[in-house]
Image (spheres, rainbow, N blue to C red):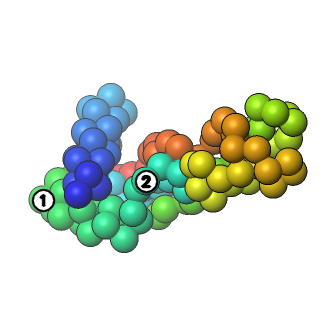
Amino acid sequence: MHEMSLAENVLQIIENAARNQDFHRVKTVWLEIGRLSCVEPDALRFAFDAVMHGSIAHGARLEIVEIPGRGVCLDCSSEAVITARYEACPACGSHKVRVTSGENMRVRELEVE
C-alpha cells in the first residue's frame, strides 16, 4: 500500500518544518488530497497513525480536505468537474480531457505547539 510511504513523506515534511520553525509537537495535520490522486483516505488514516507513533506528531489528528478533480476538454475547451481520469467531457462527449486539478496531495496546514 503506497499510503504508508505517503505517510512517511508527511512525517519528513513535519520534521523538517519543526527544525526550521522550532516547534515540538503537532496537534493537527490538514492534508489536501485530490480525488484523482489514487490515494485511499481510510488507508492513509491507518498509515498516518502507524507512522506518527512515537514521533513529534504522535496522537495528532488528521484532517483530510478533498479537492475535486477538474479538467478541460481539448476539443471544445469546456472546463468541468471530473470524477475519473478518463471521463468523457460532459459538454461534447470527447475523451480528450486534460486534468487541471485534483491529482495532488499536499500538507495544507499544521497546528503545532
* Marks 1 and 2 in Cβ contact (< 8 Å): no
Q: With respect to residue 27, does 18 lie above or below?
A: above
SS at circle 1 = loop
Q: Residue at x 40, y 56 (%)?
A: 39
Q: Residue at x 26, y 69 (%)?
A: 46
Residue 26, quarter of the rendered image: bottom left
Horizontal placement of 112 versus 34: left or right?
left
Q: Residue at x 87, y 51 (%)?
A: 91
Q: Which mark is residue 54?
A: 1
Horizontal placement of 21 versus 57: left or right?
right
Q: With respect to residue 67, does 105 lie above or below?
A: above
- Front residue (pair 31, 69): 69
Tell me how far mark 1 sits from mark 2, CA to CA: 28 Å
Horizontal placement of 35 versus 74: left or right?
left
Q: Residue at x 53, y 44 (%)?
A: 103
- Front residue (pair 54, 86): 86
- Residue 48 position in % (x across, y down): 27, 60
What amino acid is labelled 2 in the image? Answer: Cys
What amino acid is labelled 1 in the image? Answer: Gly
- Residue 93 position in % (x across, y down): 79, 50
Q: With respect to residue 88, does 45 lie above or below?
A: below
Question: Taking the image as drawn, is residue 5 in sight?
Answer: yes
Q: In which quadrant is the N terminus drawn?
A: bottom left
* Residue reaching furthest to the top: 20
SS at circle 2 = loop
- Front residue (pair 60, 66): 66
- Residue 75 position in % (x across, y down): 81, 33
Residue placed under numbered mark 2 in the picture:
38
- Front residue (pair 86, 112): 86
Q: How many marks?
A: 2
Front label number (1 vs 2): 2
